Image (cartoon, rainbow, N blue to C red):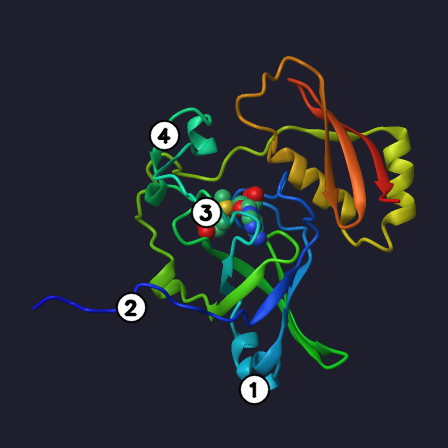
Amino acid sequence: MSLTFDTTFTFDSIGVVHSPYREKFAIPRQPGLVTADQGYIELSGPCNREEILRGLEAFSHAWILFVFHEAMREQWKPMARPPRLGGNQKVGVFASRSPFRPNPIGQSVVKLEGIRAHSGQWRVHFSGGDLLHGTPVLDIKPYLPYADAIADANGAYAPDKPGADRPVRFSEAASASLARLETEYPALQLLIEQVIAQQPQPAYHRQDEAKIYGMMLYDLNIRWQQSLQDACVITVEKQR
Ligand code: SAM
């Protein structure tokens, strides 16, 4: 008996992500790799109500299902080049976490950091995200360790967390900026260290040149110099 079913669906977002990551460059490649971020989902429309969240606060983590709104390509490709394979070896897009997918729907497990209303807007606060500021959210689901954490699972070409041991130091000017900004941006230094330690630059960039990179976290422009030994944050400046 052949199945007949719809093949195109329309969904309404249930909210939007607020996160420090204002551009795609330097966002951690998976959730949980950077933990000093402070983000939240602001619920919207008919989902902006207390009872829809009641009980979620009892869980430590939650799945966020979302739309890669800045990866919406008309023409997706059936293969991808995962950074974990050096960015030059291809695998099928279903064997990768590339944002460019037939349906740009993503899934990330985040640590819940509180659920509260702010001027009538319900917010689900989280840390450990890998989501661009403004990401539309399709669903929130509690993380169930007995079902979701599979201790003997095989991660193929991505068996464990990528290394994040590159030391990050700060120039005098950057340290002075951090001292001024720390109250307005909690855990800012740790966030910068954790993000840069992920080595966000493309895998194929040679490491023997002291290249200068820039990224936006919150409304701050952060520039750093990467070398073989370490990374040095040169400036931390508010975007004018
Ligand atoms: N954990 C999710 C998954 O497995 O479906 C996402 C993995 S994907 C490799 C994570 C990357 O997606 C981030 O490093 C960032 O570059 C990109 N990204 C995050 N939010 C996005 C958005 N709203 N639109 C497009 N790209 C986004």
- What x and y, as percent, mark residue 213? 71, 28
Residue type indicated by callout 2: Asp
Q: Based on the displayed image, in which of its 4 quarters is residue 220 positioned?
A: top right
What is the crowding at mark 1: few (fewer than 14 residues within 10 Å), some, or many (at least 20)? few
23 left or right, relative to 3: right
In the picture, which quadrant includes the N terminus? bottom left
- Which numbered mark, 1 or 4, is in the foreground of this view? 4
Contact, mark 1 vs mark 4 (Cβ under 8 Å): no
Residue type indicated by callout 3: Glu
Contact, mark 1 vs mark 2 (Cβ under 8 Å): no
Residue lying at 92% horizontally and 38% vertically, measured from the top left: 176
Farthest residue to the front: give it: 74
Residue lying at 53% horizontally and 26% vertically, measured from the top left: 203
Residue type indicated by callout 4: Lys
What is the crowding at mark 3: few (fewer than 14 residues within 10 Å), some, or many (at least 20)? few
Q: CA distance from mark 3 to mark 4?
A: 21 Å
- What x and y, as percent, mark residue 199? 61, 31
- Name the disc covering residue 90, or none: 4
Residue type indicated by callout 1: Glu
- Which numbered mark, 3 or 4, is in the foreground of this view? 3
Lower position in the chain sequence, tag 1 or tag 3: 1
Q: Secondary structure at mark 2?
A: loop
Give the vertical position of 21 relative to 143 (above or below).
Answer: above
Q: CA distance from mark 1 to mark 2?
A: 31 Å
Q: CA distance from mark 2 to mark 4?
A: 31 Å
Residue lying at 88% horizontally and 48% vertically, measured from the top left: 181
Which residue is disc 2 drawn over? 6
What is the crowding at mark 2: few (fewer than 14 residues within 10 Å), some, or many (at least 20)? few
Which residue is disc 1 drawn over? 51
Between 176 and 48, the one nearer to me in the picture? 48
- Name the disc covering residue 74, or none: 3
